[in-house]
Amino acid sequence: MSSPKKGPFLEGVPGFVRDALSLCLFIAGMAIALYLLDLGCIFKTMTGLSCPGCGMTRAWLSALRLDFSAALAYHPLFWAVPIAIALVYVQAPCGELVRRAEKEPGSVGKAALGVCSFVTKHGTKLLSAFLAAFLALWVIRLIDPCDAGMLFGGVPPAGVAPDVVGWTAPVWMQWLGM
């Protein structure tokens, strides 16, 4: 009797659930630590620039309140994050499924094989496109003095500050008295 394969994504559903829960616990722990230390965004603390994901938390909070215009004003690509995370998490299992289907034809359903083949062939390209879009949007938002209104003719929705991203002196410079 062979032992179960070790490594990420090779332990089936229990391994996937364990990995997903570990990731959620890590993110929650980091969020609590940042809150308790009152640092805010690490990227902005170190560089003084807003990060490419600036406004993402506010966008998701607005989306959860079903205020999608505010969500898009805070970060127009907020919706892409769960898609990117899903792509990262399913690429390895999909690769395994496609390889199994090649070895044992008929062992995998046509719909699952079709989705997994698409993810295996185009997943990296989609992730690269998301990354390029995030970086391009970041540069545009840094240049635009009314970045929250970029999708709304320069007028941000009610309750949203006109400039979500920008530059300030890095916190470490303030600590040194610069």
Image (spheres, grey):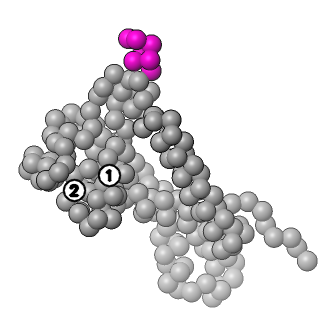
Is 175 inside the magenta-drawn segment?
yes
Q: Residue at x 61, y 84 (%)?
A: 108
Q: Secondary structure at mark 1?
A: helix
Q: Which picture quadrant has residue 62?
A: bottom left
Q: CA distance from mark 1 to mark 2?
A: 9 Å
Q: Amino acid at mark 1?
A: Arg
The residue singled out by tag 2 in the image is: 70
Residue 86 inside the magenta-drawn segment: no
Q: Which residue is mark 1?
A: 58
Give the camera-side residue of 123 and 35.
35
In the figure, 43 relative to 91: above or below? above
Please give left or right for residue 17 compared with residue 41 in the image.
Answer: right
Q: Is residue 163 left or right of residue 121?
A: left
Can residue 26 be seen in this snapshot?
Answer: yes
- Kindly identify the amino acid type of the residue bearing the numbered disc 2: Ala
On-image quarter of the N terminus: bottom right
What residue lies at 26% left-to-right and 67% top-to-bottom?
66
Could you tell me which residue is drawn at 79 percent across and 67 percent down?
A: 5
